[in-house]
Image (cartoon, rainbow, N blue to C red):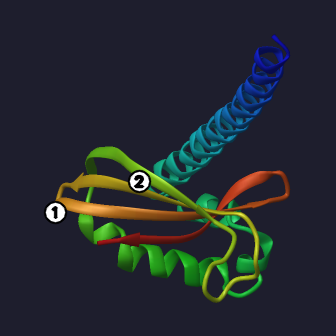
Amino acid sequence: MKRTFAFLICLSFILFQGCAIHRSVSKSLSEKREREKEGRAAALHWLQLVDSGEYAQAYEEEPARLRASNTEAQFIRSMEGRRAPFGRVRSRIFIGAAFTRKLTGSPDGRYESILFRTSFEHKAVAAERVILTYESEQWRVVDYRVY
């Protein structure tokens, strides 16, 4: 009887630890989903500015450290050269997101890389990558590429 009781006590500790691990994993997955959702919303908002040619507003929404390294006019010229040739967006589908604390050429922080499959007026199949950083309590775009 004592052995059975001891066995049940040990088993309950093992199961309790398993539940604690499961709760921890569930919490981290829900936090990951929430972070991706917030990052995706910020990326889509910024992309809508770019899609409508509102490059000055898109520039204003970049982190201050990036605005300090390049002028609004430089940013607008860059976007006109990189994005405008593709024309209007026909469709944009979220593919995935990846979180990292390190980004080449940038200080350590919180970064989210968001990938979209996009169809443009002058490029039927393309991929857009928007990299955001979490600064000043919000996600801000630090890099944009079209492939």
Query: Three-letter amino acid code at disc 2?
Result: Asp
Query: Three-letter amino acid code at disc 1?
Result: His
Rendered image quadrant of residue 67: bottom right
* Residue at the image position 63 percent from the left and 42 percent from the top: 38
Residue 51 bears which disc, if any?
2
Q: Is residue 119 above or below residue 71?
A: above
Q: Of callouts 2 and 1, which one flags the residue occurring earlier in the amino acid sequence?
A: 2
**Left or right position of 112 against 79:** right
Q: Nearer the viewer, residue 10 or 63?
A: 10
Q: How many marks?
A: 2
Q: CA distance from mark 2 to mark 1?
A: 14 Å
**Left or right position of 72 against 95:** right
In what element is the residue under mark 2? helix
In the rendered view of the protein, which quadrant contains the N terminus?
Answer: top right
**Left or right position of 47 against 106:** left
In the rendered view of the protein, which quadrant contains the C terminus?
Answer: bottom left
Q: Nearer the viewer, residue 87 or 7?
A: 7
Query: Mark 2 touching mark 1, by CB under 8 A?
Result: no
**Left or right position of 89 against 97:** left
- Disc 1 crowd, CA 10 A, few/some/many (<14, 14-19, 20+): few
Q: Position of residue 24 (x, y in %)?
A: 73, 37
Q: Is residue 61 above or below residue 66?
A: above
* Residue at the image position 45 percent from the left and 73 percent from the top: 79
Q: Position of residue 126 (x, y in %)?
A: 23, 62
Q: Nearer the viewer, residue 100 or 61?
A: 100
* Residue at the image position 61 percent from the left and 39 percent from the top: 29
Residue carrying label 1: 122
